[in-house]
Image (spheres, rainbow, N blue to C red):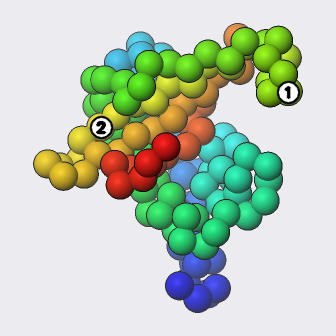
Amino acid sequence: MNDKDFFALVKKRRAKYDTVKNIYCPFLKEIVFFNNKGFFHATHSSDKTFRKRADSVRRLNLLPHIYDCIKYCSEFEYEPRVTPKNDKRNRHNKEIVEYELRHRVNKSFKVVVVLKRIGNGRLYYWSVYNNNQTK
């Protein structure tokens, strides 16, 4: 994918992402918020460096599925992960909880959405991956 096409995809996905401020998740019985961190994570790694182009494109193409996953999921991909506030990798100094919600789009394709809460803050969208990606 050339630069022009890539930046057009980023702009298109960002425009849709910015229209959704929050979605209620019946499975977790909570509102999930959308902020810049989730979109930034689609194109950047946790260390704030750019992802490889193919990885960014894959994540950007999965973004349209996150809304249905949050609305209709009924199971976890993995049990929620809790990082204690005193963990040496935790730079927030607050407990971090991550939920991985699984949603089957069709028979052979599932999407997993990662939601995150830092301390007592809001639950927000963090990341997305599909069943072809290994953790």
Determine the image quadrant of residue 42.
bottom right
Amino acid type, residue under disc 2 in the picture: His
Q: Position of residue 73 (x, y in %)?
A: 30, 29
- For marks 2 and 1, the one nearer the N-term is 1
Outermost residue toward the left? 107
Query: Residue 32 vs residue 120: left or right?
Result: left
Residue at mark 1:
91
Residue density around tag 1, few if under 14, some if 14–19, many if 20 or more, within 10 Å = few
User: Residue 10, relative to residue 128: is it above or below?
Assistant: below
User: Residue 24, relative to residue 9: is it above or below?
Assistant: above
Q: Helix, strand or loop at disc 1?
A: loop
Q: Position of residue 64 (x, y in %)?
A: 40, 54
Query: Does residue 22 appear in this view?
Result: no
Q: Position of residue 92 (x, y in %)?
A: 83, 23
User: Residue 100, relative to residue 67: is it above or below?
Assistant: above
* Residue visible at 55% across and 64% down in the picture: 55
Q: Which label belongs to residue 101?
A: none
Query: Residue 14 vs residue 28: left or right?
Result: right
Residue at mark 2:
103
Q: Helix, strand or loop at disc 2?
A: strand
Q: Nearer the viewer, mark 2 or mark 1?
A: 1
Q: Position of residue 106 (x, y in %)?
A: 17, 49
